[in-house]
Image (tube, grey):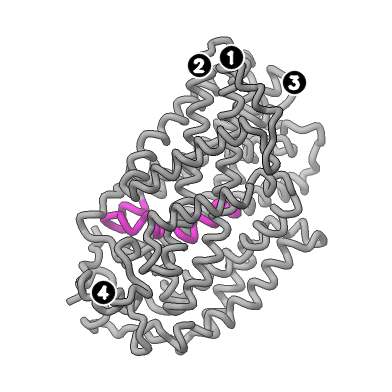
Amino acid sequence: MTSHPVVDQAALAAKDPDGHLYNDDLRPAKPDERRWNTYSLFCLWMNDAHNAGNYTFAAGLFLLGLSPIQVTLGILGGVLIIFGGCCMSGFMGHDTGAPYPVVSRLSWGVWGARFTALVRGVVAIAWYGVQTYLASIALKVLIVKFIPGMESLVGTSFLGLDLLGWIAFLILWGIQLLIVRRGMEAVRHFQGLAGPAIWLVMIVLAVWMLWQANWQISWTKGGGDVVLSTGEQWYQTFAAVGLTVGVLATLMLNFSDFARFSPSRETVVRGNLLGLPFNWTAFALTSVIVSAASVEVYGKAVLDPAELLRDVDNQWIVLVGSAVFVVATIGVNIVANFVSAAFDLSNLSPKRISFKTGGIIAACAALLSTPWNLYNSPQVIAYFLGGLGALLGPFFGIMAVDYFLLRRSRVSVPDLYDPTPTGLYHYRNGVNSLAVWAFVPSSVISLTLSLVPAFSRIAPFGWFIGAALGAVAYYFIARGRLPILPSGDRARRAPGEPVS
């Protein structure tokens, strides 16, 4: 079992009395706080995988013409890459005990890291609002089904959303805020309950659909009307790999937010192994089985699991199943978006913004963005969120090369919280210009591939290209020019060495 740092918290706070870089939420995790064991991380991935959005993603690939086997292989390829990336970012969190905004100070500088955290935070806030809106649609349908009189509220609209929609949205908005307000331990406990629940519903749904289809589905035929050529099938399968990575690239960047609470690197690997290659692929396979069975039963692939639940005669099954899907969407939203946004905003002004305050700001910003209008504008989704998302590849490439290849995992935790010019990671005016030089060209290329229609066939692989370009550029620009800790220097902590 790998050890983790024992850091003098009082010394860190004294080093930054004005709270420019340090507060009680951004500080390194204490040994007694490292309770995120293998099951906790496994549940985290269950929450991130088990939701209607990922069901629709897998079913959508099936509808494009890929067979269930090809969809499963494409998603498996993507999650294997995510597994490796999340282990890397997870090791950074475990070794330092710090969340992503603090870890990124290593490669970007203590002030430059605010840029990376802000970009990640904006993406998280936008998607938090959109995911909450999508969950509110399911809740709205559920309310109307069991309280028909509420449908009269649909006729009144405000800021593009009807009154019943507002009620459903605010209910879910408030529930998520309450969970995050109680801190990371509340997030851990919520995940432990919500993750397995959706698995149970999906297994029941798959068995029911297979029974309806007389236990016969095609493993080699796609669900769409178009028959793909062999070359197109290969392309779409590899595109599924790229799209899967794109879906999870945000969480891969800030996985240290959760892994910082793990007791060992081995725990990070085991939790990710169970949650990604095994669990995520199994959920994707289950989703495709349900979709393939729906072709046999209804003559078409059903992309929304809520539609399948509506066909069940028992109202209690419909109630429980729909409620579980709503809870699952809350789970993925908290894991992938809310926690990151709270830490990222706290990093902008640690003295004034705690994790809980950051969560409130993120929730209010998501509400003010009227995410239903954002979601209903494909151009805004494509250019705003797609553009910001394209920056995450270079961010990850630079961060990974900096930590593992150039610094060999040797980091001084106290200097990550040192705002003075003498700090090891202050660089020049608090910014590592080497990271900026590597980031600019790689991000321009990544953005071009993501936003210019002429490159639509390459767009699914934009994250890979951006990450590779950022990594290669940073390696050659920064090699031999970074402050590297010498082996055995006790004043600068390496993984497993206590800070005096």
Give the secondary structure at mark 1: loop
Residue type beneath disc 3: Gly
| Start-end of magenta stretch | 245-269
Q: Which residue is identified by label 4?
A: 12
Q: Which residue is located at x 20 percent, y 67 percent?
A: 6
The C terminus - image quarter: bottom left
Q: Where 113 sits versus 225, above or below?
A: below
Give the secondary structure at mark 4: helix
Query: Principal SS element in the magenta part?
Result: helix
Question: What separation in Å lies between label 4 and label 3 (alpha carbons)?
Answer: 63 Å
Give the secondary structure at mark 2: helix
Q: Quadrant of residue 288?
A: top right
Residue type beneath disc 1: Val
Q: Which residue is identified by label 3?
A: 299
Q: Where 384 sits versus 6, above or below?
A: above
Q: Which residue is located at x 37 percent, y 39 percent?
A: 190
Q: Which residue is identified by label 1?
A: 312
Q: Position of residue 39 (x, y in %)?
A: 33, 42
Q: Which residue is located at x 46 percent, y 40 percent?
A: 174
Q: Which residue is identified by label 2?
A: 317
Q: Which residue is located at x 50 percent, y 35 percent?
A: 171
Q: Position of residue 79 (x, y in %)?
A: 52, 49
